[in-house]
Amino acid sequence: MDTKNPEEFYKRLQEQLEESTTWPSDYLYKFIVESDPDKIAEIHTIFDNTGAVIESKQSKKGKYTSISITVNLENPKQVIDKYKEVGVIEGIISL
């Protein structure tokens, strides 16, 4: 993500999603976060009650956890809203 201008990044992402995807559609999020149970739980909470399928895998040394989330969303705005919700978690990397 372009940390210098996140709004420009989200605008471009929304345009790409509108052009390339028929909505509603499944969307795959990928995040990397420190293997902190509180941070991982926070991500799970954000996607609670959405029907999301969440898969987690720890790094070889266990310091980081990659999280893949597949969820069916109605439109690109919902995709971006979830990125923004998760983006407030300290140290999270969105892929």
Image (tube, helix red, strand yellow):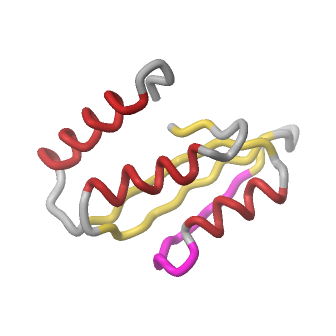
Which residue does the image show at 64% across and 69% down from the upper left? 45
- Name the residue at 67% across, 46% down: 89
Instruction: Name the spot of residue 17 as percent of width and height, x first.
Output: 22, 47
Q: Residue furthest top?
A: 4
The percent coordinates of residue 56 (x first, y second) are 67, 58
Residue at x 66%, y 40% (from the top left corner): 92
Left or right of 54 in this view: 21 = left
| Spot occupied by residue 29 in the image (x, y as percentages of width and height) | 47, 52
Locate residue 46: give its quadrant: bottom right
Choose top left, top right, bottom left or bottom right for residue 33: top right
Q: Position of residue 77 (x, y in %)?
A: 29, 55
In the displayed structure image, the side of residue 4 where residue 37 appears, left or right:
right
Task: Give above or below for 77 relative to 89.
Answer: below
Say if the magenta span includes residue 27.
Answer: no
Span shown in magenta: 48-57
**Relative to 47, residue 93 above or below:** above
Picture quadrant of residue 64: top right
In the image: residue 41, left or right of residue 27: right
User: Is 41 or 62 nearer to us in this picture?
Assistant: 41
Q: How many marks?
A: 0
